[in-house]
Image (cartoon, rainbow, N blue to C red):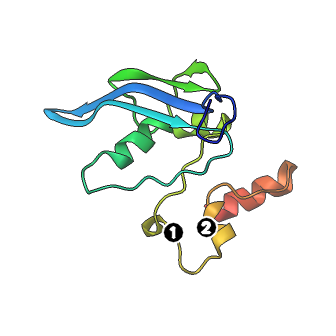
Amino acid sequence: MDQKGGSLMTPILSARQITKKFGRVVALDNCDFDLMPGEVLGVIGDNGAGKSTLIKALSGALRPDHGEVRLEGELVQFHEPLEARRAGIETVYQNLALSPALSIADNMFLGREIRKPGPLGSVFRFLDR
C-alpha cells in the first residue's frame, strides 16, 4: 500500500544504480530514481549534486557507466535525446536555454514546431535554417 492507501503503482520511469564518471570525478554514484504515473518532477539540489547528469542520463544525452533505466517496466537504453523523446521522455531546461522574446508555448516547442507535410513544409523548414 502507498501512503494514500492505494495499491502500489509501478513507476513509469525508473533508474537503478546509475553511475556516471568523468575521469576521476564521480558525478552519479549508484543513484536510484522513480517517477510515478501522473507526476511532474522538478529536480533541485546544490551545485555539483548531479542533477543535470541524472537528467541527461535519463533522456539519452549521456550514457551511464553503470546501472539500468526502465520505461513502463521495460529496460531501455537511449543513445540520443531524440530516441528518448520518441519514447515520451522530454526535458524542459532552465530559463537560460529559453528566448525571452517567445511565449511560454513557443519556448516549450522550440525546435519541434509543427510544420505542414509535403513540399511546402519542407520549404518552410529550409527557410528556418
**Badge 1 amino acid:** Leu
Q: Which image quarter: residue 113?
A: bottom right
Q: Secondary structure beneath disc 2?
A: helix
Disc sitting over residue 107 in the figure: 2
Three-letter amino acid code of the residue under disc 2:
Asn
Position of residue 51 in the picture relative to residue 3 (left or right): left
Is residue 94 positioned above or below 77 on the image?
A: below
Residue drawn at the location 40% of the way across and 35% of the way down? 62
Q: Of 94 and 114, which appears nearest the observer?
A: 94
Camera-nearest residue between 92 and 83: 92
Based on the displayed image, in which of its 4 quarters is residue 12 positioned?
A: top right
Picture coordinates of residue 39 (x, y %)?
Answer: 62, 47
Q: Residues within 10 Å of mark 1 (few under 14, many from 20)?
A: some
Q: Position of residue 46 (x, y in %)?
A: 27, 56
Of 103 and 72, nearer the camera is 72
Camera-nearest residue between 116 and 123: 116
Mark with earlier residue (1, 2): 1
Picture residue at 65% right of the left edge, 30% below the top: 9
Q: Are marks 1 and 2 in contact (CB under 8 Å)?
A: yes
Q: Quadrant of the N terminus?
A: top right
Residue hosting label 1: 98
Where the C terminus falls, by quadrant?
A: bottom right
Residue at 68 percent across and 68 percent down: it is 105
- Dot label at residue 71: none
Circle 1: element type = loop
State the image coordinates of residue 44 (x, y, percent, origin top left). Answer: 39, 56
Q: CA distance from mark 1 to mark 2?
A: 6 Å
- Location of residue 30 in the rendering, given as x and y in whole percent from the top left corner: 31, 27
Residue found farthest to the bottom: 101
